[in-house]
Amino acid sequence: MGVERANRPSALSAPTATGPSATVDIVGSGPSSKVVATLASGESVEVLLYGATVTSWKSNGGKTENLWLSEKAALDGSKAVRGGIPVVFPVFGPPPKDHTTSSLPQHGFARSSRWEFLGKSASEDALGSNSVKLDFGLYTSGLSEDARKAWPLDFGLQYSVTLAKDSLQTVVSVRNEGGQSFEFQFLLHTYLKVKDISKVSIKGLMGVEYVDKVLNASTHNQSDMDLKITGEVDRVYKGIPQDTTTVVEDEKPRFDVVRDNLQDTVVWNPWTEKAAAMGDFAPKEGFKQMVCVEVGTVNGWQKLEKGEVFEGGQTIKSFL
């Protein structure tokens, strides 16, 4: 059994609903199959089984799409999805030399492996608001031969995606199922959709140290209260004291991104040149309608002993 951690994300669960709360369907077949959940009030989420990648999340009765998805995103299992919420595990970025992850591709294998759909559960809170939770699993036995050779360790991942009326919670549980300890990194690479990046600012990072990958991975301190995106941004904010990072657009809150048992956040926008260089990034001006706010544990490594469990995730609140 796993070791209980003091700070585990609290699920959005409640007593089981009695009324019609949600419909859950598996759409398509093979590598392009996805799970689609829709609340009675119209909000919806779509999760591609390839990578367990959330490719759509609609709030406001289903009228507002909150995630940016490239028009050229591969949704057929041929490569990791550009957009939505890819799951990064067990390494973030290019793997370091002389480490157990050294033979893996950038961002690891979770986002390019086919996950199992483990089932659904619906609930209703005291105010009558409904939610639906979708569970997905990825285990050593489900990896490709190449991935198992590159990372020959026994693990289990469980990923829970909970859709509520104005929020989406995504939580990953990592279990060490082998006889030896292992180290890993984990990140949810969330692409948030905005109307105009020039009117966007990000709050909640002031005073935090970050590594700036645009400036040769040099270390800086966030001195401004608001982070504005005016060019390429690729920053790893480390050990953030407060849990919430807020995306503001037109001086109004657009998203709250609330971390649970995760200390780091990556902020990324490729801007003109990087967007143009990515074959699966479309439209090329799409960087003006997106910003990545990516929660994770990527500063150093998480270590799990035999039988231990690590759990971390996020709740994103949409104000539209």
Image: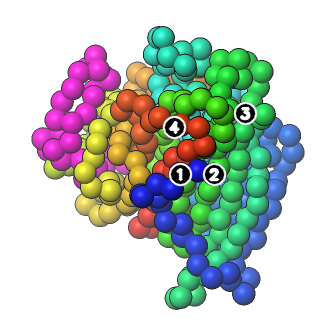
Structural distance between the alpha carbons of marks 2 and 1: 7 Å
* Amino acid, disc 4: Leu
* Amino acid, disc 1: Val
The residue singled out by tag 4 in the image is: 304
Structural distance between the alpha carbons of marks 4 and 2: 13 Å
Point out the tag, 3 or 4, that comes first from the N-terminus: 3
Q: Residue at x 53, y 60 (%)?
A: 169
Q: Residue at x 77, y 47 (%)?
A: 116
* Amino acid, disc 2: Met
The residue singled out by tag 3 in the image is: 140
Q: State which region is magenta.
A: 196-224
Which residue is more in the foreground, 140 or 55? 140
Point out the tag, 2 or 3, that comes first from the N-terminus: 2
The numbered disc on residue 1 is 2
- Relative to 254, residue 185 above or below: above
The reply to whether the C-beta atoms of the residues labelled 3 and 4 are less than 8 Å apart is no
Helix, strand or loop status at disc 3: helix
Residue 43 shown in magenta: no
Helix, strand or loop status at disc 4: strand
The reply to whether the C-beta atoms of the residues labelled 2 and 1 are less than 8 Å apart is no
